[in-house]
Image (cartoon, helix red, strand yellow):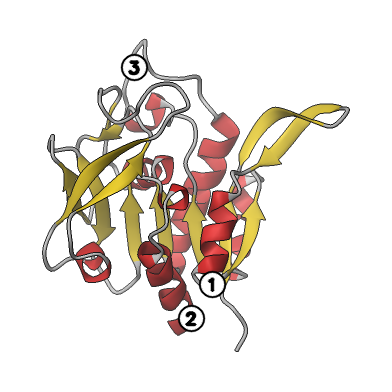
Amino acid sequence: MAKPLIGVTTYLEPAAWGVWRLPAALLPAGYPRLVQAAGGTAVLLPPDAPEAAAEVVSRLDALVVAGGADVEPVHYGAEPDPRTGPPARERDAWELALIDAALAAGAPLLGICRGMQLLNVHLGGTLIQHLDGHTAGPGEFVHHDVKPVPDTLLAALTPEAAAVPSYHHQAVDRLGRGLAPCAHAEDGTVEAVEAAGPAWVLGVQWHPEMGHDLRVMEGLVAAARAR
């Protein structure tokens, strides 16, 4: 049986390697490695024209929207907080279109950190633009406990409370349409959301690609295989 094809969104950033200094579509290697370890084949999806999203999703078995820059507050009707980072407008437009296409097609969807926030915003939710305690400093992940909500999609995959690798300073404020919280941090921050309906749709605020627990990604791959 062919492995499910899992699309993973990428950054678009200036980068340096060897003698080169060029704009690059890039992604931390933990993402494709996590997909591969969970039994899928990873395909990287650099920013593209939003109108291409439906065709791209039609060729995938599942979609992962990766972490990265803060979502531009204009997408949820807010003014930027001074601590909100610079926008990644090409990513915002492309990934919002991918989320829309995946939801319309009933494709399995996993949002990681920024990806969970974009999912919430796409469905009409808002974000807390700054909170403390969810990083260990610039470029350093912190591990903190996350407790799943019983009888949710996440609890079926990871029923126990666990320390997860975290790096974010924004989080869900008002939940988007059809979303329910399925995990919380000790300070009450919503750490995971899932969508009502038959499709497999999950967002996690932490970074499973920086840890060793495959279960969330295995859940996505299993849903992709079943589809």
Which residue lies under the disc numbered 2?
225
The reply to whether the C-beta atoms of the residues labelled 2 and 3 are less than 8 Å apart is no
**Residue for point 32% across, 30% down:** 170
**Residue for point 13% across, 58% down:** 149
> Dot 3: few (<14), some (14–19), or many (≥20) neighbours within 10 Å?
few
The reply to whether the C-beta atoms of the residues labelled 2 and 1 are less than 8 Å apart is yes
Q: Is residue 138 left or right of 174 when viewed as pictured?
A: right
Mark 2 to mark 3 CA distance (whole Å): 41 Å
Amino acid type at image mark 3: Glu
> Dot 2: few (<14), some (14–19), or many (≥20) neighbours within 10 Å?
some
Q: Position of residue 217 (x, y in %)?
A: 42, 64
Q: Is residue 165 left or right of 150 when viewed as pictured?
A: right
Residue closest to the eye, 119 or 97: 119
Mark 2 or mark 1: which comes first in sequence? 1
Mark 2 to mark 1 CA distance (whole Å): 7 Å
Which residue lies under the disc numbered 3?
79
Q: Is residue 106 left or right of 19 when viewed as pictured?
A: left
Please name which of the two marks, 2 or 1, marks the residue nearer to the observer: 2
Amino acid type at image mark 1: Asp
Secondary structure under the numbered disc 2 in the rendered image: helix
Which residue lies under the disc numbered 1?
61
Amino acid type at image mark 2: Arg
The correct choice, above or below, for 164 with respect to 138 in the image is below
Q: Position of residue 218 (x, y in %)?
A: 42, 70
**Residue for point 36% across, 66% down:** 215
